């Protein structure tokens, strides 16, 4: 376990301890454990820790195709997960779409203002006509009852029948290769956004950069494979793979950049 922990960051320690306690719970009760919604970095940590244990397996689901936030099941190897084991409800929001366009932040803000923990709902998908989002079954009735307005717009939410199509993600990750001098946050941002190192540092200290959904203000913060960084106004980048070093000791880096299909 110690050898595992050194691969993760210090501030991920509490989450790692949480995962280890889930692992023990499943081993002791010999019954599956369902987590709240986890982001890709958290799922990577769970899979890394549970992956060391032959008796246990993990799977995750978020209902939407390529859902970013998913609930995970940690379960004994005899168990065969079904869709209903993830306890997910998809809602569609009815609102006057002719007159107003709801955006992702509007819906996120409305859900949080109900006093809901972010870990209790998954992805929110928005297109011109429709808005859909996933919640944990245990808060579904609460959401159905209390989500009656978003901003100044009156809305009502309804759970989706299995026959209704889910909104597809219009985003695509495009792979790109870079050669960088280090994995420092400012270095990667300067390279990927093609800006000066000073400009990259200003973005970081100006609280415009998040790594795995957490604001980072340290310019020398070290990135790792699997990290997702978002720079306000410039989209998202995923660190896919480091492919060794060049003769000049630079790091070969594969990244994914999120582009929106037109």
Image: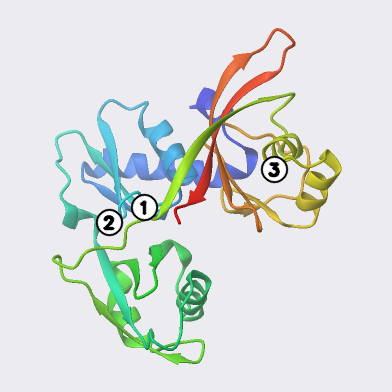
Q: Is residue 187 above or below residue 111?
A: above
Residue 142 x, y percent position in the rendering: 33, 81
Q: How is the image coloured?
A: rainbow
Query: Residue visible at 18% across and 53% down?
Result: 83
Residue designated by label 1: 67
> Helix, strand, or loop for circle 3?
helix
Element under label 1? Answer: loop
The residue furthest front is: 262
Say which mark, if any, is on residue 63: 2
* Label 2: how many Cα within 10 Å (few below 14, some 14–19, many 20+): many
- Placement of the C terminus among the 4 image quadrants: bottom left
Does residue 69 appear left or right of residue 250 in this picture? left
Among all residues in the image, which is located at the extreme right?
A: 198
Q: Residue at position x 14%, y 35% from top? A: 78
Tell me whether the residue at label 2 lies in contact with that at label 1, contact meaning CB atoms closer than 8 angstroms. Answer: yes
Tag 3 or tag 1, which sits nearer the N-term?
Answer: 1
Q: How many marks?
A: 3
Q: Specify the label residue 193 is tagged with.
A: 3
Q: Is residue 253 left or right of residue 82?
A: right
């Amino acid at each position: 376990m110690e050898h595992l922990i050194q691969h993760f960051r210090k501030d991920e320690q509490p989450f790692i301890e949480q995962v280890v306690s889930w692992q023990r719970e499943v081993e002791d009760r010999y019954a599956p454990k369902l987590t709240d919604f986890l982001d890709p970095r958290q799922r990577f940590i769970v899979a890394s820790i549970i992956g060391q244990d032959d008796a246990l397996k993990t799977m995750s689901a978020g209902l939407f195709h390529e859902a970013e936030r998913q609930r995970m099941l940690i379960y004994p190897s005899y168990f065969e997960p079904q869709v209903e084991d993830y306890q997910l409800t998809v809602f569609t929001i009815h609102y006057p779409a002719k007159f107003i366009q709801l955006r992702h932040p509007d819906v996120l803000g409305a859900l949080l203002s109900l006093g809901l923990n972010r870990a209790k709902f998954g992805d929110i998908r928005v297109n011109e006509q429709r808005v859909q989002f996933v919640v944990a079954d245990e808060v579904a009735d609460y959401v159905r009852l209390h989500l009656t307005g978003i901003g100044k717009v009156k809305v009502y939410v309804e759970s989706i029948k299995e026959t209704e199509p889910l909104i597809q993600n219009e985003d695509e990750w495009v792979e790109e290769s870079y050669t960088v001098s280090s994995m420092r946050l400012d270095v990667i941002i300067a390279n990927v956004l093609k800006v000066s190192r000073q400009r990259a540092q200003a973005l970081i200290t100006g609280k415009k950069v998040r790594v795995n959904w957490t604001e980072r203000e340290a310019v020398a913060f070290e990135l790792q494979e699997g990290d997702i960084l978002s720079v306000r106004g410039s989209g998202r980048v995923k660190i896919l793979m480091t492919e060794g070093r060049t003769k000049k000791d630079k790091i070969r880096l594969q990244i994914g950049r999120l582009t929106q299909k037109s």
